[in-house]
Image (cartoon, rainbow, N blue to C red):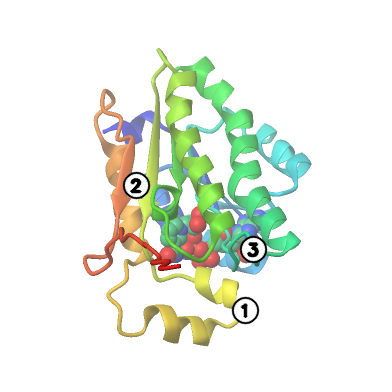
Amino acid sequence: MPFTDYKTALVTGASTGIGAVVVERLAKQGLDVHAVARNADRLDDLARRTGCTPHAVDITDTAALTELVRGIEGGVDVLVNNAGVSRSGNILTADEFAIDEQVAVNVQAVLHLVRLVMPGMVERDLGHIVNISSIAAVYNFGGNTIYHATKAAVHTLSRQLRVDGYGRRIRVTEVCPGRVETEIFGRLLGDMEEAQRLYYDGYESLKPEDIADAIEYAIGSPRHVNIGHLEIMPTFQVPGGLNFERRAD
Ligand SMILES: NC(=O)c1ccc[n+]([C@@H]2O[C@H](COP(=O)([O-])OP(=O)(O)OC[C@H]3O[C@@H](n4cnc5c(N)ncnc54)[C@H](OP(=O)(O)O)[C@@H]3O)[C@@H](O)[C@H]2O)c1
């Protein structure tokens, strides 16, 4: 029902993975979808398939983001902050690039987009912001410390936005996925085949469609319902665990 309330959507990270499927779904629901990512060829292909408007933009470029949002007539009704990157390393091993890129894509761009889009939602008394965080936002496990920190920021921001939009018909949904079969690990390793072998072969991972189903559900819920936080994991993936190093000396 609320899909008919909305006219325009903006989806980041739209060239592949979760974002591309979300664009397809929102376009099918009749929204005018602006699809954002760097890879122009993939976006053009998506535009041919879905009718979306492609924007080949690096979301770490704040000036380009500003121009893009200002050019969308009537404002953005549905913002899906989906673009994200993961790089190897905990704080003892991560390099400068790992910190800078993850902060810029996973947090800085999300903050700027919300800053650029949400005032219009307040003015129109209408809007839905969907932030894709991760189970890394809410659980601690070894590996990518910067990723955890940036996704925890998205988690807190998602709750805070409800406070900022208090009294207006603005809904905010955080989606926290476990492992989804996309390019994210291949980009991390710089080797798609190796990532497929290490992270996906033999596992029943989530598919981008599973996450898109949840987003459609949240946006399609009745106007008075805000689906705030959705944790979605593969059945065979479980968070938790406790480490306790024995130091006999
Ligand atoms: N896959 C998982 O297991 C998993 C689990 C939990 C959470 N997530 C989260 O889900 C979201 C989607 O990830 P995914 O798994 O679908 O990843 P993916 O397949 O690697 O896709 C990432 C998308 O982000 C875009 N992107 C990256 N850097 C960008 C930049 N600087 N400017 C513009 N676009 C940029 C990429 O497009 P271009 O390269 O064309 O720019 C691509 O469209 C991310 O926020 C991720 O952290 C994923």
Q: Classify residue 226 as left or right of residue 80.
A: left
Say if residue 186 shows up in the picture. Answer: yes
Decide: few, some or many residues near mark 1? Use Cα within 10 Å; few <14, some 14-19, many ≥20.
few
Locate residue 5, reporting x and y percent.
36, 29
Q: Nearer the viewer, mark 3 or mark 1?
A: 3
Decide: few, some or many residues near mark 3? Use Cα within 10 Å; few <14, some 14-19, many ≥20.
few
* Disc 1 residue lies near ligand 1 with CB under 8 A: no
* Disc 2 residue lies near ligand 1 with CB under 8 A: no
**Disc 3 secondary structure class:** loop
Q: Earlier in the sequence, mark 3 or mark 2?
A: 3
Q: Amino acid at mark 1?
A: Gly
Q: Nearer the viewer, residue 8 or 157?
A: 157
Q: Nearer the viewer, mark 3 or mark 2?
A: 3
Q: Earlier in the sequence, mark 1 or mark 2?
A: 1
Q: Classify residue 225 as left or right of residue 107.
A: left
Q: Is residue 41 above or below residue 61?
A: below
Residue at label 2? 215
**Disc 2 secondary structure class:** helix
* Image-quarter location of ligand 1: bottom right
Which disc is residue 92 wearing?
3
Q: Classify residue 168 as left or right of residue 95.
A: left
